[in-house]
Amino acid sequence: MKKTLIYLFGFLAVPFFFTTYAFAHTPLCSCYDNGDGTITCEGGFSDGSSAAGVSMTVQDKDGKAVTEGRMTEDSEFTFKKPEGDYTVVFDAGPGHVVEVPGSEITE
Amino acid sequence: MKKLVMLLSLVAAFALSAPAYAHFQTIYTPQSALSKTQKINIKLIFTHPWEAGHTMDIGKDQSGKIHPPIAFGVMHKGKKKDLLETLKAITFTSLSNKGRAYDVNMKLKGMGDHVFYFVPAPYYEGAEDIYIQQCTKAIYNIAGAPTDWDALVGDPLPTEIVPLDKPYSIWKGMSFRGVVTCGGKPVPDAEIEVTYMNHNIEGNNFVTKENMEIPQPDLVPIGIKADSNGEFSFTFPKAGWWGFCALGAGGDLKYNGKELSQDAVIWVQVVDIK
């Protein structure tokens, strides 16, 4: 009986903890056009933790990286606005990626 | 003699029910949770939101003179920015009159919480022969990052309600908890009025349409109390903007020789569920 309970607990609780983690820790990234030919993106997590050091990539319409860098200590990343369509990729690891289409980035 | 007693008790009953007028200072914008940096309009209106009733001239003293607001600003990532000079005087039209209000068009820039705060000059309320000064907060968020919503603003707010739940992340049926504070310390047993913006704002007017039929008209605003730690909670039956006003939370004060009710107000937006 005890064993069954332990197994039951294991089966139910482990996936539960994993799921909770993913939900409780949503990656966030929001960008705006500075109006001077540059874009600034800010990052973070839904629990308020910093995004300092998170990998940032700006891709052109073919998915090719045109700019690469990392979030600063203030969880910011500023880059030169590319010509044409582009996408900003905030990559904090598997399950923690945010893609921001350039078309949604306004002043 | 009996008649006089009856008349007096009627007058007394009326006078006692006067606080049911429920003045509320607003810091209003249509949406509190925004997805990205954008331009917003904020309106500061001193009114009776539940009935879209009498709108007061913000900062009007006993002689009828209107004094300019004392403080208006925003706190973002721990830094406060003074916005007093950006305020523009407007005339706001309620369902029954017009009053002096203020608004500002601005760009709300940067991910995280933007805690707006307002301190008006005291308003003389003739019906109660007191001055009222409502220190008001409203918290808007961009892109979900929690940065400042639970922090005490402090100076220039002598009294304020500090949220224990994100005021822009409440769905219908959820609750809001807050702590009434004065000088950063909890105000035990604070008396709180709860109001609902029952008429939407369009331009500089209230619209006539009601969002809800008030089930107990004699009992609005809803009265609640903080506990011995200054903490209160309220569960929302309806989506929209709800306001909390901790009466006299600033303590026993006088202004121009009259009683000053220095209240702490906070606005919370409840989102509907489909």
Image (spheres, coloured by chain):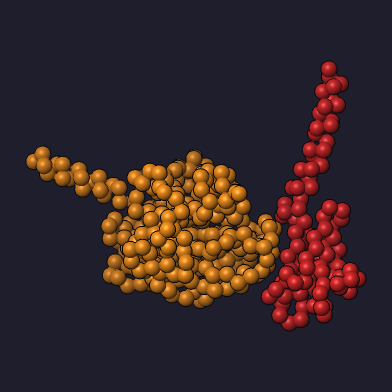
Chain colours: A red, B orange
- In the picture shown, does residue B87 fall above or below B196? below
Q: Does residue B126 appear to the left or right of A24 in the view shown?
A: left
Q: Does residue B203 appear to the left or right of B13 in the view shown?
A: right
Q: Residue furthest bottom?
A: A36
- In the picture shown, does residue B81 fall above or below B194? below
Work out whether residue B231 can be spotted: no
Q: Residue at x 73, y 69 (%)?
A: A104
Q: Residue at x 57, y 69 (%)?
A: B40
- In the picture shown, does residue A54 fall above or below B191? below
- Residue A10 in percent (x, y) is at 84, 31
Image-quadrant location for residue A36: bottom right
Q: Residue furthest left?
A: B1
Quarter of the image for the N terminus of chain B: give it.
Answer: top left
Q: Residue at x 52, y 68 (%)?
A: B42
Work out whether residue A17 can be spotted: yes
Q: Does residue B147 appear to the left or right of A94 in the view shown?
A: left
Image-quadrant location for residue A68: bottom right
Q: Residue at x 66, y 69 (%)?
A: B37
